[in-house]
Image (cartoon, rainbow, N blue to C red):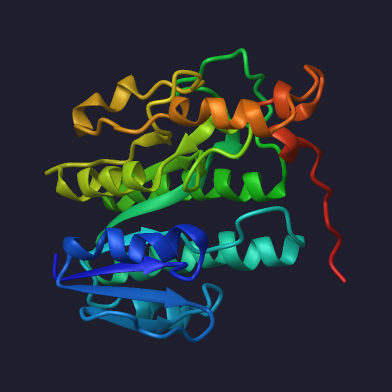
Amino acid sequence: MKRLLITGAAGGMGTVMRSKLAHMADIIRISHRSPMAVGREGEEFALCDLADRDAVFSAVEGCDGIVHLAGVAAADKFSNIVDGNIVGLYNLYEAARANGMPRILFASSNHTVGFYRQDQRLDAKAAARPDGLYAVSKCFGEALAQMYYDRFGQETAIVRVGSCFDKPRNYRQLATWLSYDDFASLTERVFAVSRLGCPIIWGVSNNAASWWDNSHVAWLGWVPNDSAEAFRAEVEATVPRPDATDPIALYQGGNHVTDPIYEDD
């Protein structure tokens, strides 16, 4: 690609992916709602509040692909969720439609199915069971992506990201962990295949305890290399094991099922 847009480039995943995906395009355009310094050759910056339609259109213009990591990433006031994850995503898809429909990787969330129990194994056909308003906004995003594909042919990889960190931090993340390297390799495959469509992909490493089945996207050629098992001993030695009735041990969404519904001021 000539130009790849990474939205949310100041976030945890975005900060790491700026370097890990740098080889994928001549220019990596990073965007955030606050000013950021361009840190390396081949980067350019686009100031972009997702709720600002004109700013989103400007950020998308001239891009051959989009890795969409921006938006509200946890429980928040509903107005913030609406601006970032609903209005903002609509703006992104309209901008893509107006600019040649570059392929999109949309970072959805495992919390779209957060109210399933941890003893249930899910494939991509499982009905949504969101565990909060943030998760509901991601369900909206998945539906929006599917509609734009069915109506206009806009290709999107809907990636239900598990827990993307340098390592798993608790017992639940022994099942949900997604390594940075595995996310980067998934991104490579999303933009490499000749035809993508609009698949739902579980964003999870090769964890022995995983609850999610990616066999339906074997054609993508993505095989995660990392496993949370490499960190099991560390977790068991440093993290208290939760009671079996604790939400973090019972639900796939963990403690997010008890997040408050924040009221707007």
Residue at position x 19%, y 32% from top?
221
In x, y percent, where is residue 260?
84, 48
Q: Is residue 100 above or below residue 228?
A: below
Residue at position x 41%, y 52% from top?
106
Residue at position x 11%, y 44% from top?
194
Q: Is residue 89 visible?
A: yes
Near-viewer residue (32 or 169): 169
In x, y percent, where is residue 27?
20, 75
Q: Is residue 12 above or below residue 56?
A: above
Quadrant, the N terminus: bottom left
For this view, does 240 lie left or right of residue 96? right
For this view, does 130 lie left or right of residue 3? right
For this view, does 113 lie left or right of residue 25? right
Residue at position x 40%, y 29% from top?
227
Q: How many marks?
A: 0
For this view, does 58 lie left or right of residue 223? right
Quadrant, the C terminus: bottom right
Near-viewer residue (139 or 72): 72
In x, y percent, where is residue 261?
83, 51
Near-viewer residue (230 or 86): 230
